[in-house]
Image: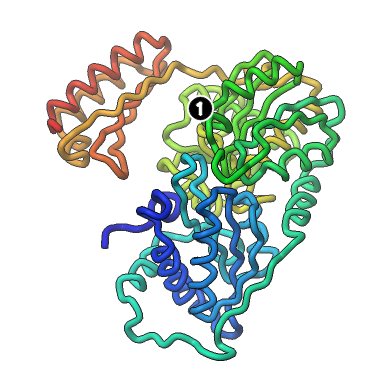
């Protein structure tokens, strides 16, 4: 068996790659592995999903697998990923399962597993689950009778989560009009309610999930609709989450995009002013724009960089006890209120900053200037060898020396495809494109596809 868990759980095309049989098998292995942590009680798992049609099928298989392994299940229905993580902690559950493929198209789905407290699983636990799958039922006896797990439905889980989010801000949002693109996903009911209860005037779009329309031309990966709606409704800003609402991007009153880097810059300044930005430091990935680093250096705020993936940001936040982290893509993590990226929470605190300062989003976002960024995906024969080829490394060093403090180069082998990603930032788009194309040529020669 190849590596089953990717950077964000198990993911694939539902009923083709990700079958109900696989979901049941993963659930059994997860229950067997995670229940070993504390044998003093019958294990408890929280199970939620986004509104994809295939989620109904995979939820049934997952619940069957968990209960067959003696785990009691609290089924919370359609909720955002961060809501499920929150409820794992609130219920003092042993672990949780979220069925979602996040921003992926509707035919895909995924299995995300949370440890106790709502934290993402460390690599070693994922490897143990995979080993249990590989071993099958060897050395294990299924429970029978009273040992079989039971299933209960939690009907007010959304209410608990809404009140938790609203309680995270003290600044009323009166006077702010926001367009919220819910991606026809898991936050379609919750996001508008949270923002209205916090005092904002809300226009909700793509908030009518039918199981088939999640992320379909909407949400954080398709911003044209929210940009147009902001201008049409004369809103102060727009917010767009993805299908499971663990990420958020924003749009100014003029329809300009505000990405995760800019949102982090705004929140970092607000938190430092409030005295809650631990060590005047926050966490980003290597893909964050150099403009963020330059702006925060000017403001006296330090950045810690991790590999790409919100799980690595989370690991660093926990290890260093820091209070803010995230990715350019819109995963914003505020550990004081959430154990994972939370798009609805990030949007709430962004609007609170606007209300507190009386400044429009465009002015707040101007604290950083994004440098032009060019990304070239180069097909290669061997991604690892190409990325470490002496000629490639020498060309990258030469390019970095040429760019100096006005740009940077990042070469990164893809985690799933035979590609090397060449990313270049520079003072002008023309320079970035020229340097990126030159490096891409060297990479192609190093390991032809």
Q: Is residue 336 above or below residue 404?
A: below
Residue located 46% across and 53% down the image: 110
Q: Nearer the viewer, residue 286 or 342?
A: 342
* Circle 1 SS class: helix
Is residue 282 shown to the viewer in this render? no
- Relative image position of residue 208 (x, y in whole percent): 67, 39
Q: Which of 390 and 46 is in front in this view?
A: 46
Q: Is residue 365 above or below residue 114?
A: above
- Relative image position of residue 122 (x, y in whole percent): 45, 60
Residue located 58% across and 71% down the image: 94
Left or right: 285, with 384 as reference point: right
Q: Name the residue under label 1.
A: 293
Q: Nearer the viewer, residue 107 or 407?
A: 107
Residue located 48% across and 50% down the image: 311
- Relative image position of residue 159 (x, y in whole percent): 78, 54
Q: Which of 325 and 53 is in front in this view?
A: 53
């Amino acid at each position: 068996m190849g590596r089953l868990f990717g950077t964000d759980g198990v993911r694939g095309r539902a009923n083709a790659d990700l079958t109900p049989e696989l979901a049941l098998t993963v659930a059994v292995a997860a229950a067997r592995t995670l229940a070993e942590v504390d044998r003093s009680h019958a294990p408890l798992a929280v199970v939620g999903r986004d509104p994809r049609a295939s989620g109904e099928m995979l939820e049934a298989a997952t619940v069957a697998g968990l209960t067959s392994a003696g785990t009691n299940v609290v089924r919370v229905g359609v909720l955002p990923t961060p809501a499920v993580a929150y409820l794992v902690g609130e219920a003092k559950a042993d672990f949780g399962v979220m069925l979602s493929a996040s921003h992926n198209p509707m035919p895909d789905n995924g299995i995300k597993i949370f440890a106790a407290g709502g934290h993402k699983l460390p690599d070693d636990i994922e490897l143990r689950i995979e080993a249990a799958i590989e071993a099958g039922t060897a050395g294990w006896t299924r429970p029978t009778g009273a040992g079989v797990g039971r299933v209960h439905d939690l009907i007010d889980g959304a209410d608990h989560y809404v009140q938790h989010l609203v309680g995270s801000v003290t600044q009323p949002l009166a006077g702010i009009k926001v367009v919220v693109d819910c991606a026809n996903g898991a936050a379609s009911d919750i996001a508008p309610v949270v923002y209205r209860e916090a005092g904002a005037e809300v226009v909700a779009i793509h908030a009518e999930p039918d199981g088939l329309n999640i992320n379909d031309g909407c949400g954080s990966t398709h911003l044209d609709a929210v940009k147009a709606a902001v201008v049409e409704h004369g809103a102060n800003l727009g917010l767009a989450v993805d299908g499971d609402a663990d990420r958020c991007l924003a749009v100014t009153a003029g329809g300009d995009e505000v990405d995760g880097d800019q949102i982090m810059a705004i929140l970092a300044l607000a938190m430092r002013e409030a005295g809650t930005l631990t060590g005047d430091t926050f966490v980003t990935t290597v893909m964050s724009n150099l403009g963020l680093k330059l702006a925060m250096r000017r403001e006296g705020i330090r950045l810690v960089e991790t590999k790409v993936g919100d799980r690595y940001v989370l690991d660093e936040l926990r290890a260093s006890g820091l209070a803010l982290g995230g990715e350019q893509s819109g995963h914003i993590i505020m550990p004081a209120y959430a154990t994972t990226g939370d798009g609805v929470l990030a949007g709430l605190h962004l609007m609170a900053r606007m209300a507190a300062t009386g400044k429009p989003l465009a002015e707040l976002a101007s604290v950083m200037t994004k440098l032009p960024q060019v990304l070239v995906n180069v097909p290669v024969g061997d991604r690892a060898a190409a990325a470490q080829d002496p000629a490639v490394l020498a060309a990258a060093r030469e390019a970095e020396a040429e760019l100096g403090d006005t740009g940077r180069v990042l070469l990164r082998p893809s985690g799933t495809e035979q590609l090397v990603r060449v990313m270049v930032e520079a003072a002008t788009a023309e320079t970035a494109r020229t340097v990126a194309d030159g490096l891409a040529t060297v990479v192609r020669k190093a390991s032809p596809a």
